[in-house]
Amino acid sequence: MPEHLRRAPTPQAVGRTPWRIPDPATGDDDAGGVVGFGADLKPSTLVDAYRRGIFPWPHPGVATPWFSPDPRAVIPLDGLHVSRSLRQRLRHCGWSTTVDAAFEEVVAACAHRPGGEGTWISRDMGQSYVRLWRMGWAHSVEVWDGDELVGGLYGVAVGGCFTGESMFHRASDASKVALVDLVARWAEAGGVFIDVQLPTPHLTSLGAVEVPRAEFLRRLEAVREHHVPVVVDRLPAGRLA
């Protein structure tokens, strides 16, 4: 990509969390990898947890659970599966993509997807990630049809690892375009892999692979101090075909 394009700034310091973050290797595999409950969703707590490979996943009726699943699902940057039909969509859609141009709108759209999916993103949860975004730790990818937001995703960047949290689409394939764009920008910026947390058939079809928790934690520790200044400017989706 041209050198003149704008890139995301270095994340701000978040301070120390007052909570004792559990050992991620102790996840209860019979409970999906849960390592603990409670704490808060302040930037210091979230960043400390993500740096250790732990993420929150709210469940109704209980204090916030924190997870470190085994196995972990990741997308290698050279392993994304782009189908022929998706490449055709990229060539002919006329869409464009940005990073961090509409973070709050992306989070809101992920929290209110049709059919009730994504409702685990509570108001407090969404606001917590907005705070992370403002401090440079969280990022969104937006897909635009002209000035209309038609898809996107958001997640947390810890060094060379980007942990995807949620995605949405209002036009067919728009969330897939967001993922393809993320992989391209992350690789170009020096990122190493994308963490998608839990394997699903949809993510597997896009190239996600399962790795043992111990291996994931070793990979994360090796890259979490990297600086990955991702490009934020609007770019044509057709470049990804």
Image: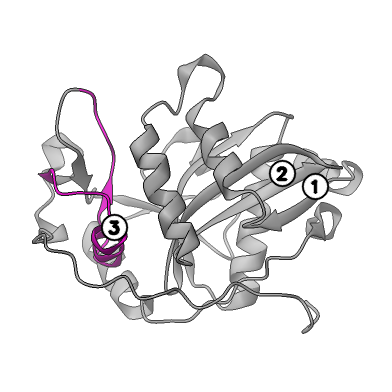
Residue 83 is tagged as 2
Query: In which quadrant will I find the N terminus?
Result: bottom right
Q: SS for tag 2?
A: loop
Q: Residue at the top extreme?
A: 115
Res. 140 visible in picture = yes
Q: Position of residue 50 (x, y in %)?
A: 30, 61
Type of amino acid at the residue the image marks with label 3:
Leu
Residue 175 is tagged as none
Q: Position of residue 134 (x, y in %)?
A: 49, 61
Residue with the mark numbered 1: 87
Disc 1 and disc 2 in contact, CB within 8 angstroms: yes
Instruction: Tell me if mark 1 has few (under 14), some (14-19) or many (20+) residues whose alpha carbon lies within 10 angstroms of its own.
Output: some
Q: Position of residue 57 (x, y in %)?
A: 28, 39
Residue with the mark numbered 3: 46
Q: Residue at x 16, y 59 (%)?
A: 24
User: Where 174 falls versus 3 (above or below)?
Assistant: above
State the residue in front, 86 or 121.
121
State the residue in front, 142 or 9.
9
**Residue 161: quarter of image:** bottom left
Q: SS for tag 1?
A: helix
State the residue in front, 87 or 146.
146
Q: Is residue 38 one of those drawn in magenta? A: yes
User: Where 188 falls versus 179 (above or below)?
Assistant: below
Q: SS for tag 3?
A: helix
Q: Horizontally, is 179 left or right of 144 in the view?
A: left
Residue bounds of the magenta highlight: 36-60
User: Where 186 falls versus 41 (above or below)?
Assistant: below
3 vs 2, front mark: 3
Type of amino acid at the residue the image marks with label 1:
Arg
Q: Horizontally, is 136 left or right of 60 in the view?
A: right
Type of amino acid at the residue the image marks with label 2:
Ser
Query: In which quadrant will I find the C terminus?
Result: bottom right
